[in-house]
Amino acid sequence: MLAIKDLSVDIEGSEILRGVTIDVGAGELVCLVGRNGAGKSTTFRTIMGQYPARSGSIHFAGRDIGALRPFEVARLGIGFAPEESEVFGDLTVAENIYLPIWTRQTERPAPEREALAYRVFPNLERYRARGGQQLSGGERKMVSIARALALDPKLLLLDEPTEGLSPTIVPSIVEGIASIRQLGHAVLIAESNLNHVPDFADRLYVIERGEIIFSGTASEAHSNAAVTGAGQGTPRKGEH
């Protein structure tokens, strides 16, 4: 599904990613774990075409997407929910969720795509007419993920889906992600803390200073001293 090989990325003259290799198979849920500044968000934004790669390759469904622009990547079927959520404040919840349905046509009917987004996050039903500026952080995160799901993607990229949220809202986000996985979508999640990796994850990668230092299961990661040091840092804002 997604094959990243030997990916290196420079930003403003600084080397951020060094030889990153990640694979996500169809229907898999894979986590990319690393402390703030390790390179998780840069990896995601490079996949989406927002940053150019200095070297390496990114293939999706057998196609080289390394030179595509963000809207072209999205049209191929990659949905992205960034850490900042980036909900449109001037649009209602319903309009935010319907936006990708307008912009990408698929074989799945529009009403079905919309209904699926609300089924995954049923709490959003009562906020359909509420403006994006009136939402809490947890509600914005739900809208961001629901909007990415409404794209009808083959692969979802979820950057820090529970970061900074109230403990009361985190279970709803995790349950929504579990539902998305059960629908058969491939999912790649970025997490700052190894302990936040969902127990239904197929496997994980640990990134430290722009390099992958571990690939394996969560249980294997927890028994690896180098991994626990890299994957349990305290996250801060401004991560690349």
Image: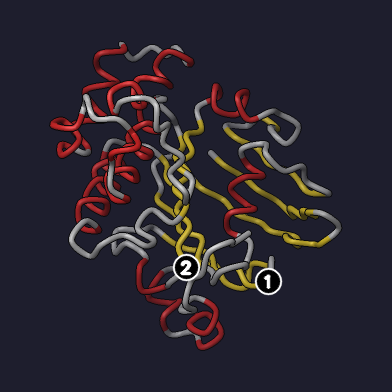
Judge the density around disc 1: few (<14), some (14-19), many (≥20) Cα neighbours within 10 Å. some
Residue 65 in picture, x, y percent from top left: 68, 32
Q: Residue furthest bottom?
A: 225
- Badge 2 or badge 1: first in the primary sequence: 2
Q: Amino acid at mark 2?
A: Ser
> Residue at image x 65%, y 38%?
59
Q: Amino acid at mark 1?
A: Arg
Question: For this view, does 15 lie left or right of residue 68?
Answer: right
**Image position of 96 with respect to 201: above or below:** above
**Image position of 124 with respect to 198: above or below:** above
Q: Which residue is mark 1?
A: 209
Q: Which residue is mark 2?
A: 192
Question: For this view, does 175 lie left or right of residue 225?
Answer: left
> Residue at image x 30%, y 30%?
131
Judge the density around disc 2: few (<14), some (14-19), many (≥20) Cα neighbours within 10 Å. many
Residue 97 in picture, x, y percent from top left: 34, 26
The kind of secondary structure element at disc 2 is: loop
Give the position of the C terminus as an image quadrant.
bottom right
Question: For this view, does 206 lie left or right of residue 7?
Answer: left
Residue 15 in picture, x, y percent from top left: 80, 62
Residue sitting nearer the eye, 226 or 52: 52
